[in-house]
Structures are given as C-alpha cells and as structure tokens.
Image (cartoon, rainbow, N blue to C red):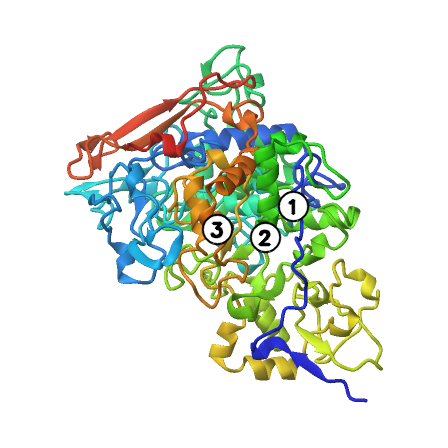
Amino acid sequence: MRLVKILSLNFGLWLAQSSFAHGPLPVSLKGAPIPPVPGLTDGTDPIVVDKSMAIALGKALFWDMNVGSDGIACASCHFHAGADSRVKNQLNPGLKSPQASGITFEKTASGNAGGPNYTLNKRDFPIHQFNNPFDKSSGVSFDSDDVVSSSGTFSANFKQVSAIKPLIDSCEHPADPIFHVGAVNNRQVEPRNTPTVINSIFNHRNFWDGRANNVFNGSNNWGERDPDAGVWVKDNTQTLSKQRLHLINASLASLSVAPPLNDLEMSCKQRTFPDLGRKLLSRQPLALQKVHPEDSVLGVFTQGKLQAGLNTRYATMIQKAFNAKYWQATDIIKIANPAGELNYTQMEANFSMFFGLSMQMYLSTLISDDAPFDRATRDENARPTNLSAAAQHGFDLFVDFHCNFCHAGPALTSAAIVTNAMMVENNPKAFGTLTAAREGGISRNTINHDVMTNFVTRFMDFGFFNTGVTDVNGDPGLAATDPFGHPYSFTDQYLAYLAGDTQKVVDTSERIRSCDFIKPLARQLTDDQPRVGLNNYFNSEEAGSIQADPNGNQACVNLQYGASIAYIPTRTAAAAALADPNTRRLAKATQGAFKVPSLRNITLTSPYMHNGGMATLEQVITFYSRGTNFDSDFKHSFLIPISTLQFDQSARADLIAFLTTLTDERVRLEKAPFDHPELIIGHGHSGNDAVVNPGNFIAPNLAQDELVVLPAVGKQGTDTPQRNFEDNLAD
C-alpha cells in the first residue's frame, strides 16, 4: 500500500495531540553538567595548558577598563549580578527597528522628553501601557519603541593604539547625530537590554538574537559562517599558517569577542583585535584599578594588600595559559587594517582567541547554584517540598501556567540545550515524570516544531520565542541576517535543508532529529508499513525520500507520537511547499523571537525583557496575566490571558515568592566566585537631558562623565550590597 504523508508545511490548523501536561519542572542547578568543549583543555595537544591561569586572564580582561577605547570594561555593563543597574543615560531610540522611529527618541511615560542623559524614574515603566494593565482589550495608553539598556562608548573613529599609554585609544570624535545634548556628544547606549552573564555558560547560543554562535572560530562571534576566520599556528615543521578553529559549546567565547570591537559598546569604529592585543600585551592587567588581596582568583597576583594592578603582564599570562604553538613564533604577520596592511606578532594576531577562550573559562565559573530553591528537598518527581507555603504555591502556579516550558531545566531556560539534554539522557526523570522532558521538547535539537497562535504549527529555533513584548515589525531579533547574508536562525537553514538547498546550510555542527519535535512534521497514515525513525543532520546528505535511522527509534530521546510520524518530507514535497515566499515566512516563528533568559537571580537583574521595558517583577507578571503586549502569527500558543493572575493578587504575590527563591545570596553579596576588582563606572554625564557640561578629558566636544566607584571586593563579599535598578529609580 502506498504511504501517504501529511506535511504540516501547508500550515493549516493542527489539532493538538497532546494532553495539557505540565512538562519539564525547574530543578536544582547543583551538579548540572557544563557543556564540554572538546580540545580546549583535554587531549594530547590542548589549546589551554593552564586552566587556572586562563581563568585569571579572563577575569582580568573582563574587569579591565583598558580593554575599551575610552575606559569601558566588559564589566561596565555587567557589574550588578552580571547585569546593569544604572538609570542615567540608559535610553536607546530603538536602533534595531527598521522603522523611522528607531532613530528618534520619544517622550517617556512620565511625560518627560527622555533621550540622552535622561534619568529614568518609576513612572517611566512599563514602556508599553494599557488603560487597564490586566486587560489588553482596554486600549493602549502609552507606547514607545525606545529601549532601556546600557551606556557604552562615545562615537569615534579609530586611529591607533599605544602599547604604553593607559586607557584611551587615539580616535577622532565627530558630532554624533543621535547621542548628543545640544552640540555635546554623550556616550552611546546599546540597542537591547543587558542580560546577566551569570549562568550564561549553559546557553547553546548567546546574545538576545543568538548571534554568538555555539562554535567559536577564534576570530569573531560568527562560528562557521565566516569563511576567513581562523588562528595562526606554528606547527612541528616550524611553519606558521592560518588554520580554521572549530570549538563546539564555546558560545561564551563567541560572545566575548564581539563587544570589544562594537562601536556602540566599547570601541572606536574599525579597531581590530590585533590592535587591542598590541595595546594590552605589555601592560599590567587592571593597572588603574585596585584589586583586593583576598580576590578569589586574582589575589595571588597582589602583594597581600589592596593595590592597583596585578604583579604580571598580559603577555606573561597568555604564555602560561595557552599552548606555545599559538604565541611563540617570531614571524611577522601582515593583516589588513583601516590604516592599511600592518605587521603584527603571532600573539597580537591571535589575541581574539586568547581573549575569547579565557573569558569563557572565567565566565564558566560564575554559576549561581546555591539559591534556596537549589537547597530545597524534592519528591520522586522532582517537585520541591519544603519551600514556604507561598513559594510552594507559586511553584505550582509556575507549572500550571506553562512558564516551565520556556524556562526549563536547572538554568530555567530552554536555551540551555546541551545541559538539559545531557541531564535527561542520564536520567529520564530528571525534570519530573518520564514524559516531562518530551512534552517540553527537551533534546539535543536546536530546531523544534510547535504550536503558535491559533494552533498553527511552525518551526522555531528552540530556546527562542516571540513573547509579544514589542511590535513584531520592530526589532527582528532572530530573524536578522549576518554580515555574510545568512539568517541568524537555524530554522531558515533547516527549511533550506528540507528543500534540498544545502548551500544555505552553514552551521554544520547542529543536529536535528524530526522524531524529537514537539509537534510532528510529517506522518504516516497507514498501519501496515514498517515504522521507522529518522535521524537527519544539517551536514547530512538526504536522498530525497524517507530514510530509516540505522539505530532504530531508540536514538530519539523524546519520541512522543510513535514511529509512524517520525518523518521529514521528501525534498520535492518540501521544495514545492516552500516555493511561495509567504508560505516560507509563515513556516517559521523567528520574527521578533529572542533567547529565553534565565530566571535565576531575577530579583537582582531588572529591568526585564530584551527592551528593558519593565522595571519590576509585578509588571512582568501583569504582562503575562493579560496575554502579553502584542499579538502576531509568531507568538507561542501558551501566551494567552491567565485569569487567575488577572484577578487574584495573592496568586501574583505567591508566584513572585517562588521567583524570589531563585536568588543566590552569594550573588547579592558579591561573594566568591562573584567577587571582583575595583571598577569606575560612568553613570551619565554632568548635567541633565537638557544641558550637559562639555570638556571631557578625552575630547572637548564630549560630555563630562559622572563617575561611580565600585570598590574591590574579596572572596568574603560585602556587607553593603549594590542597589537594584528599581531601587535607583526616582519616584
């Protein structure tokens, strides 16, 4: 009998086949596996030969103000629980939006002009408001596409660096058309809210839009997408050559190398990593910042007292931390530079690799796994049993309202793909019942197939959702395109793969198994044919027909519906279905989709959402209770009004009580591993949003910085924790 396949690429209504199961439960982070990076510290010829030194190097680089062109460290935007709690000069006009309003500032909800050097207040939140906050049908009372984010660098054009002079690169500072008060340039503000870096080691990809690739190529954040990426290696024949680097599960390294060259965040335009290497290698780390003698990582580089700088040089730390074949060559390497082709040493040429990998190793130590929720006892189905009555009820509400489908696993994010999958592979009941993981799509898949608005099934990059925070025609999020012409999303590549257009498949390390999809892609309607699974990969050769998995269906972790529907379509069928551009667009839920953030330490990391549009947890709960802000074809089906939260204040309070149990006191009190060197932070400029004082020491047309000093803290932490963002807001 002929097999009949029903392909959901027709995007009609798909009747839900699963019961209203509760899916994967949040669980303790203690002992959760960190995704391995083969070849980094293991094997016969590892890249890192001294792990402790690499961590120390990463911590020094993360906190060092010399890394930026004009005094901005990575930590300048990640100093408060891994995030940012500043409230002055923190508005961006919405530069990620293609609409005209994306380059103009709007009035704030409090009626103030907003814009550069504005000081936010409590009445400015939330950014999107309804006449009745709990009822989306009540009408919008205020909306803006401005974003609350982090102040960074002044707009400037790079000229050169010095290996001797401290802090400031040589750059030109023309008039800034956006970030200025009068004729005086202000520091620019990033276009998305700053997420915490704590626990980010568990994310398969990083940044809100996922552009920090899981594969680190040694040069930048684009992974396999950049054909020219690579590192300079001296082999056994003493030959120096540029070679490809392919480190999986190294998204934090990919993330780390982007901000130092970003001309909104840390760098003058067109600075390169070899330039940054030239600037830093001969310098004393943290030369202008005090280091606590009891710093859990850097204290050994002090003389047992509070002092500025470490008793070493960056070049020395690299030589001790990394395999010599990446730095010992004396050959000169010619690299294109805005000033022309320049000569660099091997250590300078490979500085992006040293920077990214040492930063990943440091950030991988920032795991907050000692919150009250982590210490709770649990029953056989992973449910906590000894939280307070309010928190226990809040946990139940969290599951009942399906929050746990996006915020899954120990890191409370489905973006922790490898960690979540490893836990289920080791223990099928790791997240509750035997069916809990499969109901939430937990597997090694980076693509899934699930129900969106009106029960229409679409493909999605797993761990990235459109939650209706902002207008779908504003910030594209995951639907953006990289500098090489490839969509950020893996979904677009999978659709190309299905249709046989394999030239568009660039992330060849990503594995997709259709039998692990939440909702099936294609199904067999007859019962008299062999039931086979399918194992397909981005980098596989697919002959255009249904293929059996040679390992049988057991290879699929979460085979939910049975082998009869574990299929993908033939290439002919997929190509025909996807030939219509509108059909292809509706096949996916990537427009306006953003990475699911972890909820850990959520009480410390406001403002919330990718646009920073909510200042308090109460505003977040209200947002979800009314069914979000904006509806679209790309919003997930779970995001509907929740009457219990709309009408029951005590239920909202109990949900927040549960979320409070996710805060690790070590983070709040900056105890090891969350201790740090001194940091001098710019908190807006002298003056206000109407008038600023010019005459910054960097250039006369730049506004004077108002500075806040964050003292150095040792491993024992502090008795005076930093104030949260919402506490810094004026009434």
| 6 up-or-down from 641: above or below | below
| 552 up-or-down from 576: above or below | above
Query: Which residue appears at 52% of the width and 75% of the height?
Result: 584
Q: Nearer the viewer, residue 464 or 328?
A: 464
Q: Position of residue 206 (x, y in %)?
A: 53, 48
Question: What distance separates the C-alpha of mark 2 from that of mark 3?
Answer: 22 Å
Q: Nearer the viewer, residue 189 or 122?
A: 122
**Type of the residue with mark 3:** Trp
Q: Position of residue 463 (x, y in %)?
A: 57, 54
- Label of residue 208 in the image: 3
Are the residues at dot 2 and dot 1 in contact (C-beta closer than 8 Å)? Answer: no
Q: Is residue 296 left or right of residue 703?
A: right
Question: What distance separates the C-alpha of mark 2 from that of mark 1?
Answer: 13 Å
Mark 2 or 3, nearer chain start: 3
Question: What distance separates the C-alpha of mark 3 from that of mark 1?
Answer: 19 Å
Query: Which residue appears at 65% of the width and 45% of the height?
Result: 409
Q: Is residue 214 left or right of residue 590?
A: right
Q: Residue furthest front?
A: 647
Residue bearing mark 2: 402
Mark 3 or 1, nearer chain start: 3
Q: Position of residue 545 (x, y in %)?
A: 73, 80
Residue bearing mark 1: 409
Q: Nearer the viewer, residue 685 or 471?
A: 471
**Type of the residue with mark 1:** Gly
The mark closer to the camera, 3 or 1, is 1
Mark 2 or 1, nearer chain start: 2
Per the image, label 2 sits on a secondary structure element best described as: loop
Dividing the image into 4 quarters, which one contains the C terminus? top left
Res 241 visible = no
Q: Position of residue 1 (x, y in %)?
A: 81, 89
